[in-house]
Image (spheres, rainbow, N blue to C red):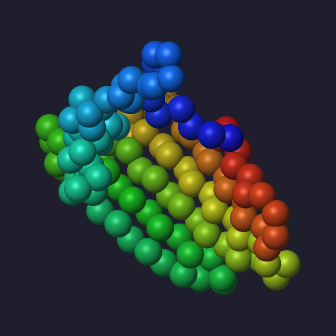
Amino acid sequence: MDRIKGLRQKNQNTYNPLVPFGTDGILVDMASGLNNEEELKLGGNHNVSITEANGITTITETYLDQADPKQVKYTVKTEISENNNGTTIITSLWEGAAEGSASKIKITTIPEQGDIMEVLE
């Protein structure tokens, strides 16, 4: 699938300059409380731990509230497992710290051959 990143208007045999779609990263608010550009550069206000056991690598990211750095805002737990058949499965679980906040799961399957499959739950 191709992505449409902008639009050009055709005038007779020429095209006008590209008018890009999108926005500046400073204008995009992220769940961490930072804007997109800050989070990409700084990584957000979070702690990370990486463990490995039984062939599964687990990355746990705990994002802290910008207003109160002692409070956890949300966590992202990613498990990476490589199976004997050459398939790699990456499972990411996003959980908000607030009571009643919804959890989100993304499962990415990378086969030895073929297309990568992603499922959001």
Relative to 9, 62 lies left or right:
left
Eyeballing the image, is 69 above or below 11?
A: below
Where's the N terminus, which quadrant?
Answer: top right
Give residue 97's quadrant in the image: top left
- Residue under the point 63% across and 58% down: 91
For the image shown, how many numbered marks are present on the structure?
0
Foreground pick, 75 / 9: 9
Give residue 89's position: percent from left, percent from top: 70, 65
Give residue 101's position: percent from left, percent from top: 47, 31
- The answer to whether residue 58 is visible is yes
- Residue under the point 74% across and 52% down: 117
- Residue under the point 55% across and 50% down: 93
Give residue 111's quadrant in the image: bottom right
Give residue 41's position: percent from left, percent from top: 23, 56
Give residue 116's position: percent from left, percent from top: 73, 57
- The answer to whether residue 33 is visible is no
Foreground pick, 41 / 62: 41
Eyeballing the image, is 106 above or below 15?
A: below
Q: Residue furthest right?
A: 85
Eyeballing the image, is 112 above or below 44?
A: below
Foreground pick, 90 / 14: 14
Foreground pick, 11 / 108: 11
- Residue under the point 29% across and 62% down: 47
Relative to 10, 106 lies left or right:
right
Where's the C terminus, which quadrant?
Answer: top right
